Image (cartoon, rainbow, N blue to C red):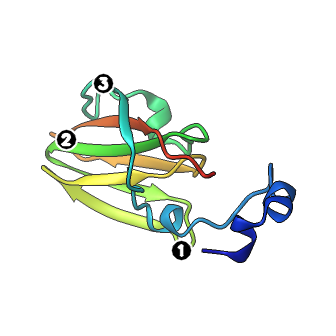
Amino acid sequence: MAPWVEDDEQRDRRIGTTLDCPLCDRCELPAGLTLVRTSPTWDETTMPAALGRAHRIAAGTWGRLRVESGALRFVASTDPVTLVVLAAGDTQGIPPDVEHHVEPWPAARFAVDFLGGVSMR
Protein backbone atom coordinates (compact mmCIF):
# COMPACT_ATOMS: atom_id res chain seq x y z
CA MET A 1 0.00 0.00 0.00
CA ALA A 2 1.29 3.47 -0.86
CA PRO A 3 2.22 5.58 2.22
CA TRP A 4 -0.10 8.42 1.18
CA VAL A 5 -3.14 6.13 1.53
CA GLU A 6 -2.97 6.23 5.33
CA ASP A 7 -2.32 9.98 5.61
CA ASP A 8 -5.60 11.96 5.52
CA GLU A 9 -4.03 15.16 4.13
CA GLN A 10 -2.04 13.41 1.39
CA ARG A 11 -5.01 11.22 0.48
CA ASP A 12 -7.32 14.24 0.27
CA ARG A 13 -4.89 15.94 -2.16
CA ARG A 14 -5.35 13.04 -4.57
CA ILE A 15 -9.15 13.25 -4.72
CA GLY A 16 -10.19 13.70 -8.35
CA THR A 17 -6.80 12.68 -9.75
CA THR A 18 -6.14 9.63 -11.89
CA LEU A 19 -4.31 6.87 -10.06
CA ASP A 20 -2.34 3.96 -11.46
CA CYS A 21 -4.32 0.79 -10.87
CA PRO A 22 -2.47 -2.53 -11.28
CA LEU A 23 -5.77 -4.45 -11.18
CA CYS A 24 -7.09 -2.30 -14.03
CA ASP A 25 -3.94 -2.78 -16.09
CA ARG A 26 -4.26 -6.56 -15.68
CA CYS A 27 -8.08 -6.52 -16.08
CA GLU A 28 -8.34 -8.41 -12.78
CA LEU A 29 -11.55 -8.13 -10.83
CA PRO A 30 -10.96 -6.93 -7.26
CA ALA A 31 -12.35 -8.90 -4.33
CA GLY A 32 -15.61 -7.79 -2.75
CA LEU A 33 -17.59 -6.96 -5.88
CA THR A 34 -21.32 -7.65 -5.99
CA LEU A 35 -23.56 -8.19 -8.99
CA VAL A 36 -25.55 -5.05 -9.86
CA ARG A 37 -27.14 -6.20 -13.14
CA THR A 38 -26.55 -8.43 -16.15
CA SER A 39 -26.90 -7.50 -19.81
CA PRO A 40 -28.96 -9.57 -22.22
CA THR A 41 -27.14 -12.41 -23.96
CA TRP A 42 -25.91 -11.22 -27.35
CA ASP A 43 -24.36 -12.70 -30.47
CA GLU A 44 -22.55 -11.09 -33.38
CA THR A 45 -25.85 -9.93 -34.93
CA THR A 46 -27.72 -8.78 -31.78
CA MET A 47 -24.97 -7.03 -29.81
CA PRO A 48 -25.17 -3.24 -29.68
CA ALA A 49 -22.89 -1.71 -32.34
CA ALA A 50 -21.12 0.33 -29.63
CA LEU A 51 -19.61 -2.85 -28.16
CA GLY A 52 -17.56 -3.28 -31.33
CA ARG A 53 -16.08 0.22 -30.98
CA ALA A 54 -13.98 1.74 -28.21
CA HIS A 55 -16.24 2.41 -25.24
CA ARG A 56 -15.99 2.48 -21.43
CA ILE A 57 -17.81 1.18 -18.39
CA ALA A 58 -18.65 3.97 -15.95
CA ALA A 59 -16.26 4.90 -13.16
CA GLY A 60 -16.90 2.80 -10.06
CA THR A 61 -18.40 -0.11 -12.02
CA TRP A 62 -16.53 -3.21 -13.17
CA GLY A 63 -17.66 -5.59 -15.89
CA ARG A 64 -17.30 -9.35 -16.18
CA LEU A 65 -17.56 -10.54 -19.77
CA ARG A 66 -18.97 -14.10 -19.91
CA VAL A 67 -18.76 -16.19 -23.09
CA GLU A 68 -21.56 -18.74 -23.23
CA SER A 69 -20.69 -20.31 -26.60
CA GLY A 70 -18.34 -19.78 -29.51
CA ALA A 71 -15.47 -17.32 -29.09
CA LEU A 72 -14.69 -13.63 -29.17
CA ARG A 73 -11.74 -11.28 -28.95
CA PHE A 74 -11.50 -8.74 -26.12
CA VAL A 75 -9.21 -5.72 -26.48
CA ALA A 76 -8.63 -3.13 -23.72
CA SER A 77 -6.47 -0.01 -23.74
CA THR A 78 -4.52 -1.01 -20.64
CA ASP A 79 -0.77 -0.67 -20.14
CA PRO A 80 0.26 -2.95 -21.81
CA VAL A 81 -2.73 -3.49 -24.09
CA THR A 82 -4.91 -6.46 -23.15
CA LEU A 83 -5.79 -8.67 -26.12
CA VAL A 84 -7.33 -12.06 -25.36
CA VAL A 85 -9.43 -14.62 -27.19
CA LEU A 86 -12.14 -16.03 -24.97
CA ALA A 87 -13.96 -19.32 -25.58
CA ALA A 88 -17.15 -20.81 -24.16
CA GLY A 89 -17.01 -20.82 -20.36
CA ASP A 90 -14.33 -18.10 -20.15
CA THR A 91 -14.77 -14.83 -18.29
CA GLN A 92 -12.84 -11.57 -18.56
CA GLY A 93 -12.71 -8.63 -16.17
CA ILE A 94 -13.44 -5.19 -17.61
CA PRO A 95 -12.07 -2.30 -15.53
CA PRO A 96 -14.04 0.91 -15.02
CA ASP A 97 -13.31 3.84 -17.30
CA VAL A 98 -10.91 1.88 -19.58
CA GLU A 99 -11.54 1.90 -23.35
CA HIS A 100 -12.24 -1.58 -24.69
CA HIS A 101 -14.16 -3.41 -27.40
CA VAL A 102 -15.20 -6.93 -28.34
CA GLU A 103 -15.00 -8.79 -31.65
CA PRO A 104 -17.38 -11.76 -31.58
CA TRP A 105 -16.78 -14.66 -33.93
CA PRO A 106 -19.66 -16.48 -35.64
CA ALA A 107 -21.76 -18.50 -33.17
CA ALA A 108 -20.49 -16.47 -30.19
CA ARG A 109 -23.01 -15.83 -27.42
CA PHE A 110 -21.97 -13.60 -24.54
CA ALA A 111 -23.20 -11.31 -21.78
CA VAL A 112 -21.74 -8.76 -19.37
CA ASP A 113 -22.24 -8.72 -15.61
CA PHE A 114 -21.94 -5.25 -14.10
CA LEU A 115 -20.36 -5.31 -10.65
CA GLY A 116 -19.96 -2.75 -7.89
CA GLY A 117 -19.23 -2.47 -4.22
CA VAL A 118 -15.50 -1.81 -3.99
CA SER A 119 -14.63 1.30 -2.03
CA MET A 120 -11.28 3.04 -2.48
CA ARG A 121 -11.45 4.53 1.05
Q: Is residue 36 above or below residue 100?
A: above
Disc number placed over residue 108 in the picture, else none:
2
The image position of residue 94, as x and y in percent, is 44, 50
Q: In this picture, is 58 found above or below 78?
A: above
Q: Which corner quadrant holds the N terminus?
A: bottom right
Query: Dot 1: few (<14), some (14–19), or many (≥20) neighbours within 10 Å?
Result: few
Q: Is residue 66 above or below residue 27?
A: above
13 sits left or right of 114 in the view? right
Whether residue 110 is visible: yes
Give the secondary structure at mark 2.
Answer: loop
Task: Residue type at mark 2: give it.
Answer: Ala
- Going by the numbered disc 3, the residue's amino acid type is Thr
**Precedes in sequence: disc 3 or disc 2:** 3
The residue identified by callout 3 is 46
Above or below: residue 91 compared with residue 116 = below
Q: CA distance from mark 3 to mark 2?
A: 11 Å
Please give the name of the residue rendered at 70% of the width and 62% of the height, measured from the top-left corner: 19
Q: Residue at x 57, y 71 (%)?
A: 79
Q: Is residue 66 left or right of residue 94?
A: left
Q: Which residue lies at the image location 53% right of the left edge and 74% below the top edge?
A: 80
67 lies left or right of 92: left
Label 2 to label 1: alpha-carbon separation: 26 Å
Nearest the camera: 112 or 10?
10
Q: Position of residue 59 (x, y in %)?
A: 61, 41
Q: CA distance from mark 3 to mark 1?
A: 30 Å
Which secondary structure, mark 3?
A: loop
Residue annotated with mark 1:
80
